[in-house]
Image (cartoon, rainbow, N blue to C red):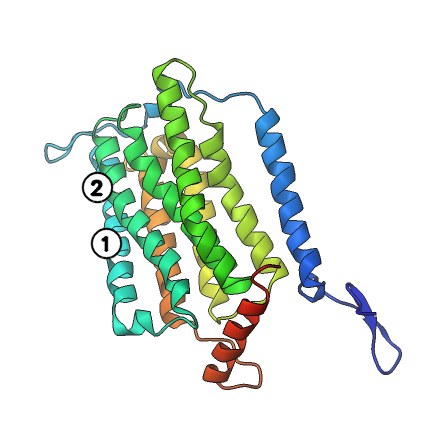
């Protein structure tokens, strides 16, 4: 019988196997169970409206005729990194950088989302209000979803992830408009969007912990994740940072810059990584993966 967690070596020494050595079905059940528990808790949680203070930021200075100038202009890195990522993916190096051409699609969505986050957040911060907020949230939501799907496709199953991309993008977008249209009638619930934003890194962590990589470059992705965490911390301390830095720059402005840097490191991950080869050539590895994906599509 196959050992799921532990095994005995030929010398008779007992050894513990890591999560990636568990049976594939067991690993998928773990992820599914965490998702079911989290979604159930979300459904039971009270509604979470946002108040007028949501749109109040520390740095409201007008510069060069631009209101809230630094919060507005600090969105430019999103636009440039998103555009850079799209141009790279559509070039020869980007097209050749994937074992399966379908793996490229969620990254196209990701960098499109990053680029339009630059537009949307720029527009929102010119005059922060409920009416402009979806322009900021929708592209960010698409970027979160696309990155999770890309990781699932690369580590678990290409066909299943590819099929789930469009429905998950629709569901993510609906979390924003559920709040927006509910808010128009006085019952806006922001919790579903927040769930997607904060639960996406949890799913990413589970996928990375439970399934081996098909590409190198994990350290670049880890740096991107650390920048993302730092950006969230800076966002939460918008006013204290602005005060402690004597009105030079706010936490929200720094959040934009650091989050843009996180997106750049995702791009760097794609540009620097190579297929993981374990005793086979790259072409043999690709052929083996595609064959395995077809066999496990219904797992």
Mark carried by residue 80: 1
Q: Which residue does the numbered mark 2 point to in the structure image? A: 73
Q: Position of residue 274 (x, y in %)?
A: 44, 75
Q: Nearer the viewer, residue 28 or 112?
A: 28
Number of marks in the rendered image:
2
Mark carried by residue 275: none
* Mark whose residue sits in front, 1 or 2: 1
Q: Would you say 214 lies left or right of 2 here?
A: left
In the rendered view, would you say 80 is above or below 48? below
Q: Residue furthest left?
A: 65
Quick one: label 2, few (<14), some, or many (20+) residues within 10 Å? some
Q: Position of residue 8 (x, y in %)?
A: 85, 74
Check disc 1 and report its element: helix, strand or loop: helix
Check disc 2 and report its element: helix, strand or loop: helix
Res 263 visible: yes
Q: Residue 15 sits in which quadrant?
A: bottom right
Q: Residue furthest right?
A: 12
Q: Nearer the viewer, residue 222 or 129?
A: 129
Question: Which image quadrant: the N terminus?
Answer: bottom right
Q: Earlier in the sequence, mark 1 or mark 2?
A: 2
At a point 31% along the width and 39% down the height, the residue shown is 253
Q: Nearer the viewer, residue 261 or 140?
A: 140
Q: Position of residue 212 (x, y in %)?
A: 59, 67
Q: Residue 87 sits in which quadrant?
A: bottom left
Q: Would you say 59 lies left or right of 221 here?
A: left
At a point 66% along the width and 64% down the height, the residue shown is 20
In the rendered view, would you say 21 is above or below 286? above
Quick one: label 1, few (<14), some, or many (20+) residues within 10 Å? some
Label 1 and label 2: CA atoms lie apart by: 12 Å
At a point 23% along the width and 42% down the height, the residue shown is 119
Whether label 1 touches label 2, CB < 8 Å: no
Res 225 visible: no
């Amino acid at each position: 019988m196959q050992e799921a967690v532990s095994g005995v070596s030929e010398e008779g020494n007992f050894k513990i196997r890591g999560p990636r050595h568990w049976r594939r079905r067991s690993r998928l059940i773990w992820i599914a169970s965490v998702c079911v528990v989290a979604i159930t808790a979300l459904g039971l949680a009270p509604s979470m409206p946002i108040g007028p203070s949501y749109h109040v930021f520390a740095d409201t200075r007008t510069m060069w005729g631009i209101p809230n100038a630094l919060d507005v202009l600090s969105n430019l890195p999103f636009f440039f990194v998103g555009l850079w990522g799209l141009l790279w993916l559509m070039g020869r190096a980007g097209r050749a950088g994937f074992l399966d051409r379908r793996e490229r699609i969620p990254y196209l969505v990701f960098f499109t989302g990053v680029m339009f986050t630059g537009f949307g957040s720029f527009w929102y911060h010119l005059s922060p209000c409920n009416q402009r907020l979806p322009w900021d949230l929708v592209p960010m939501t698409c970027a979160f979803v696309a990155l999770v799907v890309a990781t699932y496709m690369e580590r678990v199953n290409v066909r299943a992830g590819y099929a789930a991309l469009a429905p998950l993008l629709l569901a993510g977008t609906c979390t924003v408009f559920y709040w927006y249209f509910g808010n128009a009638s006085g019952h806006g619930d922001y919790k579903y969007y927040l769930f997607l934003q904060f639960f996406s890194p949890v799913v990413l962590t589970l996928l990375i912990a439970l399934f081996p990589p098909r590409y190198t470059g994990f350290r670049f992705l880890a740096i991107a994740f650390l920048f993302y965490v730092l950006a969230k911390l800076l966002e939460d301390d918008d006013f204290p940072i602005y005060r402690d830095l004597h009105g030079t720059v706010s936490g929200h402005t720094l959040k934009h810059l650091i989050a843009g840097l996180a997106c750049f490191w995702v791009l760097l991950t794609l540009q620097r990584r190579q297929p993981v080869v374990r005793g086979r050539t790259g072409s043999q590895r690709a052929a083996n993966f595609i064959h395995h994906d077809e066999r496990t599509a219904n797992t």
